[in-house]
Amino acid sequence: MMEKEIMPFSVPIYITRPLLPDIGDLTLRLEEIWGAKWLTNNGPQHELLEKKLCQVLRVPYLSLFNNGTIALIVACQSLRLSGDVITTPFTFPATPHVLKWNGIRPVFCDIDPETMNIDADKIESLITPQTAGILAVHVFGTPCNTAKIEEVAGRYGLRVIYDAAHAFGVEIDGAGIGTFGDISMFSFHATKLFHTAEGGALSFNDGNLKARIDLLKNFGIKNEEEVVMPGINGKMNEIQAALGVVMLEYIERERERRAALSAVYRQCLDRVEGITLSAEPKGVRNSYQYVVVRIDERKFYCSRDTIYNRFREYNVFTRKYFYPLCSDYECYKHLPSANSENLPVAKKIASEVLCLPLYGELTASDVERICSILVSFRGKRP
Ligand code: T4K
C-alpha cells in the first residue's frame, strides 16, 4: 500500500509560543502604572503579584526577580554557599553557571533514568568536607526525589536549592513544589507556562530569609544611608509584574489545553516501539511545560538527530533539551566530576531526548500531524 504523503506545516511550529493575554486587559493595568508614575522598586503591581503568587503556588514566602537566573544567583548568596555544590549535568546552562558566578565549584551527579532528575541515591558518594549544598532541578517539571535528597542533606548539614524553572504550579500530594528544600526558583521567561516576558521568583518556608533576599536583589540598600551587603539589581519592574497579574487569569485555561494536547501525544505515541514518553508520576499535579520523548535508535531505526533534522523539513522545530550536557561545556569539562564515566545515564539520555511542540494554540489535529510525521521516520536510518 502507498504511504499517505504528510504535508509540511505552512507556518513554523516551534517548541513553544508564549501565551499572550487580551491586550485590552493588559492596557487597563498599564494605565494604572502610567497614572501612578511608579515603574519599579516594589510598586503596587509588584506587591499584588507577589501576594497572588504565594496563593497560586501554595508557598508561604516569595520574592520576585527580573529573571530566574539572577534569582538563583541570589538564592546561593542568601544561604552563603561556598565550596562545592552537587548538581545535575542534565539542565539548562543557567543552573551550573549560577554556581560559578558565586565562586562555587559544581560537582556533577548522574541522573535517574526515569525522572531524568539528579539521582538521589548517588548524591551521598559525592559528598566531601567541601560540600555545602545540593542544587537539584525538577527537570521538565517532574519532581525530584525530594524525600531522599532532603534526608541525605539533613544528615550532612547541607543546604538544598531546587531549580523549579519548569515547575510552575506543580504540586506533590497537594503541597506546592516551592515548599521543598531551603529555596526554590521559578522562571517566568516568555517560554514558560506562566510568564512575565522575563522574570522569576524565589520561594521559601523560612520567613527570616525574606528580608535578606529582598536586600540582596536591591543592591543591599537598607535605607538612604545604609548599604548592608553587596547586593545586585534583581528587581522585577511594574510592567513585568502587571503582565504577570493579568496572565494569572489565563493560565488555568492554558494548562487545560496543554493537558489535552499532551493526552493526544500520549494516545498517538504510547505504543510506538522505540519511543518513550515521560511518565506522569502519581500524586503529582503536572505543569505541562514540555512534552518529552526519548528515542531508542535500536528500536526506532532512526536516530534522535535525524528526527530533529527531518522535522525541520516539515516546518517543525523540536528541541534537544538538554543536549549537550552541561558537564561537556568547555567551562566545566575539566572538572573531575564531569568525566563521562561518572555520568553514563545522563550521557545516554542526552543522546535520546527530544522535546516536541506544546502550547495552547496548537490543535489536536496539529499534534496528530506532528506524531504522524514522527512515526513516518521510523526505520528511515541514519
Ligand atoms: N534553569 C532551568 C532549568 C531553565 O530551563 C532555565 C531557563 C533557567 C534556569 C533560567 O531561567 P531564566 O533566567 O531564563 O528565567 C529558553 C528560555 O530562554 C529559557 O528561559 C529556558 N530555561 C530554556 C529551557 O528555554 P532557548 O535558548 O531555548 O530559547 P529560544 O529563544 O530558542 O526560544 C525557544 C522557542 O520559543 C523559539 O524557537 C520560539 C519560541 N519563542 C521564544 C521567545 C523568546 C517565541 O515564540 N517567542 C519568544 O518571545 O531558552
Image (cartoon, helix red, strand yellow):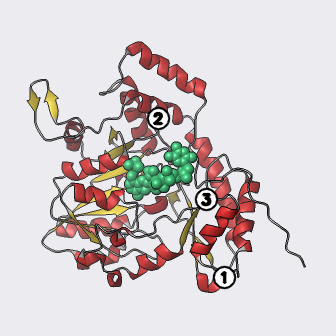
Mark 3: C-beta under 8 Å from nearest atom of ligand 1: yes
Tell me if I can see residue 204 in this picture: no
Q: Give left or right: position of 331 versus 90.
A: left
Q: Nearer the viewer, residue 155 or 135?
A: 135
Q: Give left or right: position of 287 versus 314.
A: left
Looking at marks 1 and 3 on the same chain, the residue that comes earlier in the sequence is marked by: 3
Where 18 sits versus 277, above or below? above
- Name the mark nearer the viewer: 2 or 1: 1
Q: Nearer the viewer, residue 86 or 204?
A: 86
Mark identifier at residue 317: 3
Amino acid type shown at disc 2: Gly
Amino acid type shown at disc 1: Arg
**Cα distance, mark 2 to mark 3?**
27 Å
Where 160 sits versus 56, above or below? below
Q: What residue sits right under mark 1 in the picture?
A: 381
- Name the mark nearer the viewer: 2 or 3: 3
Q: Nearer the viewer, residue 253 or 180?
A: 253
Mark identifier at residue 244: 2
How packed mark 2 is, by other alpha carbons closer than 10 Å (few <14, some 14-19, many 20 or more), is many
- Outermost right residue: 1
Disc 2 vs disc 3: Cβ atoms closer than 8 Å?
no
Mark identifier at residue 341: none
- Outermost top residue: 35
Looking at marks 2 and 1 on the same chain, the residue that comes earlier in the sequence is marked by: 2
How packed mark 3 is, by other alpha carbons closer than 10 Å (few <14, some 14-19, many 20 or more), is some
